[in-house]
Image (spheres, coloured by chain):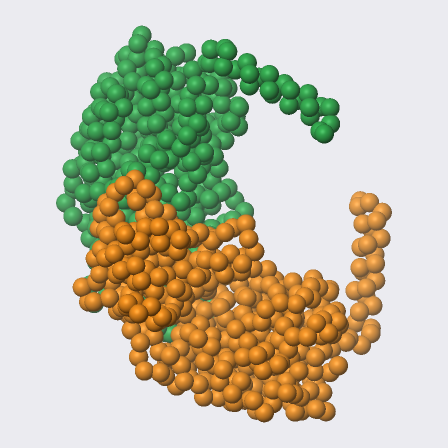
Chain colours: A orange, B green
Amino acid sequence: MPALPTRIAALTCAIALLASPLRAQAPADKLIDGALKDSAAWNRLAELVDTFGNRPVGSESLESAIDWILAQMKKDGLDNVHGEPVMVPHWVRGRESAMLLTPHRGPLHMLGLGRSVGTPASGITADVLVVNDFADLHAHAAQAKGKIVLFDHHFDPNKPPFDAYGEAVIYRFAGADSAAAYGAVAALVRSVTPHSLSTPHTGAMGYGDTTANAHHVPAAAITLEDADMLHRIQNRGQTIRVTLSMEAHMLPDAHSRNIVAEVRGSEHPDEIIVLGGHIDSWDVGQGAMDDGGGFVSAWEAVRLIKQLGLKPKRTIRVVGWVNEEMGSRGANAYRDAHRAELAKTKFAMESDNGAFTPKGVRLTGPDSLLPVLRELIAPLARIGVTEAAMGDPEADVTPLVEAGVPALALDIDASRYFWYHHTDADMMSALDPKQVGMCVATMGVVVWGAANR
Amino acid sequence: MPALPTRIAALTCAIALLASPLRAQAPADKLIDGALKDSAAWNRLAELVDTFGNRPVGSESLESAIDWILAQMKKDGLDNVHGEPVMVPHWVRGRESAMLLTPHRGPLHMLGLGRSVGTPASGITADVLVVNDFADLHAHAAQAKGKIVLFDHHFDPNKPPFDAYGEAVIYRFAGADSAAAYGAVAALVRSVTPHSLSTPHTGAMGYGDTTANAHHVPAAAITLEDADMLHRIQNRGQTIRVTLSMEAHMLPDAHSRNIVAEVRGSEHPDEIIVLGGHIDSWDVGQGAMDDGGGFVSAWEAVRLIKQLGLKPKRTIRVVGWVNEEMGSRGANAYRDAHRAELAKTKFAMESDNGAFTPKGVRLTGPDSLLPVLRELIAPLARIGVTEAAMGDPEADVTPLVEAGVPALALDIDASRYFWYHHTDADMMSALDPKQVGMCVATMGVVVWGAANR
């Protein structure tokens, strides 16, 4: 038999369970229970990503997914369901490979970086210079000319994941220009992740065009395992020779859309609470975590408010921004299309840190709103969402923040986020139905509270 | 300041440290210290696999690796260094892909299974039937004809890894024949692993030719993530259509070699202690864990005995068996070439469970040898190797066991073994220098003890 305190706790729990159906449930509790009672959000996300696959800007799969979402939103009974036009960049990966020629012949496991130029059809064959970072490249400047430079900067496992990412991603973003400035013919970068099972990570890169003699060289990420191997080979004094082949190229900008749907406010319909995520993804995996899970959590929160018959005083608007991954065109287009409403946009909330266990909500805006945020998340204490703090906004609400709108973001357990980020492993299998439900509950409770206070 | 017992312990430790150089070290302690003092074994393994890559039977890389190892063994000063001829099967993977056509178009992440036939050049395009296991296939027999059958049997995370593997691997080995018996045109199998980052696992399959109307259909493994996705799609009642393309084919048997080298016994050179691992690998990753690490641990143990000037009474012979992965031809050839010596082969020790932290040694042979094994491993208690138990032999020593030779195997922490097994992630990055050193120490101390008792 358990000790007395355990028995008392069990009894208290039993009384609470018996009592709960007898009292009228607060809307926040209804939202939490609704979000957690089945796997609705996980299942809807799975149906989306299994049916349409990943959703890179410019792709037919993205546009088909948007069509389907808009149709489903109408079936959900949401108000004002529509797409808003956005012109998006259209980068196409094509076929690609990196082949190690010496000291042994074998494939390197790679993904070209988004926006990279391609190679000639015969590829680029050159020796590899491995460097740790920009300073190390500078120290070996004399050896870089004509080489493929590999930036082998490690993801720091002792830092918070997003901090370690922030430090490492600069090599993915700017490695090509930096290598080209020293005369290199291509850049490789160690994938930005703490954990790999031969899993390359793509992501955006950019050409700055700031260096007069810089030219655009192709850039690709290789796995941690392959980067470790090349570094060891160099340390042994052996020559590393590689053929990099990439068909990557840009096409003219393509037509796409931001997704918009609402539950109209009953008292102040012109005052707006925005929530959402981005609907585009990289062209690998399913884009289930990044950011299918964020967008679908927001959508499900709004669907749940509608389904439960809750009537918000202010308008709650869900937005699926397009083109977060290739430069925030959707975020800017949303701001531009809704400039007249921004003064009455009370909060803009985004989820783009993975639909894992939420820990709290962070605020970008006046400090004076922090007590308001604490009030908004108070009903979430029962599911462990308790942290309210100031912090940085997510990418898609950043243009709104710059226009003075307070932003909210989910703070989520990030321990596994960079395992899957921008990889073929960003699949439904990475996500847990209960954790996705907790994200729905968090977004639903916060926007409900914000719409009614 | 620490509490008194802590200070006394620290003092005792300091005295021991001061005293240790003053007394003659036992050979076992010299071997342990030598194996752990630097990363020699890990570095030699890295040089092997970085220089030659993976080592599938029939490949030039395997033969070049064998040449290099034999040359290094001579430099090490080992005795009787030579290769022993073995004819090996020669399966070639060629190009391969699996493309999902509906409900969306996108690549499945796959590896063809070893010994599988290929597809026609245009591939095999068919609908997919997902089943959990053989019984589920039987229950859906009427639906299998003309389909590609996916066996979605899960690796049980609650069982010891090698037990879970044993249960699941039957679908990899026999899935093709089973599917073909129901009229299927190809078989896919969920990769045999508990953890994946979009990581397909190859491995051997076989055609039994026992069913009169069976024909050989191609077989490939797909990732956990893709298997989960296809199963969800089927559960939604949607059609799954896939094109499987594989160039896989067999070539005529090829010439290869077992590697043999010795430290000759000073008193009973005709009495032999064998230790080793297998030198071939799959044609993915580097074969660093499976079984580069096992073979190099054995080699390094013998090199260390030689380097330390230790003179065993009996002969210690290191063997690199070839073709463990495709059917144990090397193991059988070793037995056949050394039949006359088997009665005087006292123990045959193999490491093929990954060069992770060793926990103990297991015995296949008369129970009466268990006290001997306990005595042999006693010096390893200081590095945590303490378990002596009866158990199954590794594959390459099984023909010796059948001929009456007692076998020993390293029991190793298997928690991560099946993450890397038969994948592109079987790279040096999976292995830790200290753990590899512990494997060297364990093999060295055991064979030294066995050679001198």
A136 lies above or below A291: above
* Residue found at x 22% / y 33%: B68
Indicate the quadrant containing the C terminus of chain B: top left, top right, bottom left or bottom right. top left
Count of marks overlaid on the render: 0
Of the pair A207 and A416, the residue shown nearer to us: A207
Q: In this view, does A348 lie to the left or right of A144?
A: right
Of the pair B126 and B145, the residue shown nearer to us: B126
Q: Which residue lies furthest to the top in this view?
A: B267
B45 lies above or below A99: above
Q: In this view, does B68 lie to the left or right of A412?
A: left
In percent of width and height, residue B4 lies at 73, 24
Q: Residue furthest front?
A: A212
Q: Can see residue B77?
A: yes
Q: Is residue A206 left or right of residue A366?
A: left
Q: Can see residue A242?
A: no
In percent of width and height, residue A6 lies at 81, 49
Of the pair A265 and A394, the residue shown nearer to us: A394
Of the pair B216 and A174, the residue shown nearer to us: A174
A191 lies above or below B163: below
* Residue found at x 63% / y 85%: A345
A288 lies above or below B426: below
* Residue found at x 31% / y 76%: A250
